[in-house]
Image: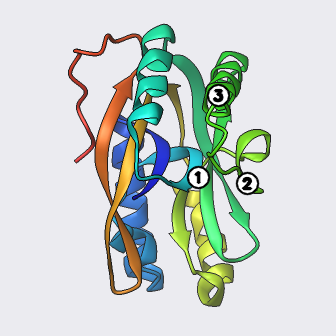
Amino acid sequence: MRYILPCFFAGPVREYHQALVDEIATRFDVPFTRRQAIPAHFTLKYHFDTADIAPVEELLEAFARANRPTSLEVGGFRHFDEDVVWVNVALSAAARATLAALHAVLRRLAWLPWGPHDGEHLRPHMTVAEYCRPRFADLWAYLPARERHFNAVFDNVTLLRQVGEEDGITRWGVYRAFPFGAGADAPATPPP
């Protein structure tokens, strides 16, 4: 099975992201990100495959229980070439330390792959449009009026599992959420 680890955002950040993704998809006819239907998040660890997720779950459970939420700021548009438009996720020093600690814990799993955008090369961001090169100039000119900034928290690690593929889009479902500072029995509310 294939997995990925994001931190999901809640509240106003989630609402802003959903509205912006919908607006961009409709106005500029770049629906890929909307069709993916993944709520507002930033990626902590990119894709990996395993038949036995239990060792990852054990590490994440202990990590989440031992850590507390840390602050970050969400805001400011950026882009990867002209293909992906995203909102910056600026980690506080404490959030950077928590992310580095998470990567250190995950590196205990010798089989876990680390790609060129993982670990210390990770650039925290919240994607709002993908495959937008044909409309990039118009989209980029449109975005400044939509810019907002939010104080938010790095307060969870969520384990997503690939649940299928539909029309060329990988579908993900919440396998398990690990809220920070909670014991193993604490309920986690996965995103819608």
Give 66 or 91, whichever is nearer the viewer: 66
Residue matched to label 2:
117
Is the Cβ of the residue at disc 1 closer than 8 Å to that at disc 2?
yes
Residue positioned 54% across, 56% down in the render: 47
**Whether residue 169 is visible:** yes
Label 1: state its secondary structure.
Answer: strand
Mark 3: secondary structure: helix
Residue at figure coordinates x 57%, y 20% from the top left:
71
Q: CA distance from mark 2 to mark 3?
A: 14 Å
Which label is found at residue 46?
1
Outermost residue toward the bottom? 134
Q: Is residue 111 above or below residue 63?
A: below
Q: Say if mark 1 contacts mark 3, CB within 8 Å.
A: no
Quarter of the image where one finds residue 134: bottom right
Density class for disc 1 (Cα within 10 Å; few <14, some 14-19, many ≥20) is some
- Residue type beneath disc 3: Leu
Tell me if residue 57 comes above or below residue 23 in the rendering. above
Kindly identify which numbered label has been placed on residue 99.
3
Marked residue nearer the N-terminal end (1 or 2): 1
Amino acid found under the numbered disc labelled 2: His
Q: Earlier in the sequence, mark 1 or mark 3?
A: 1
Residue closer to the observer: 51 or 186 = 51
Residue 150: x and y in percent read: 52, 34
In the picture, measured across the screen, residue 85 lies left or right of residue 120, that is left
For the residue pair 67 and 58, the one nearer the viewer reads as 58
Residue 181: quarter of image: top left
Give the residue type at disc 1. Tyr
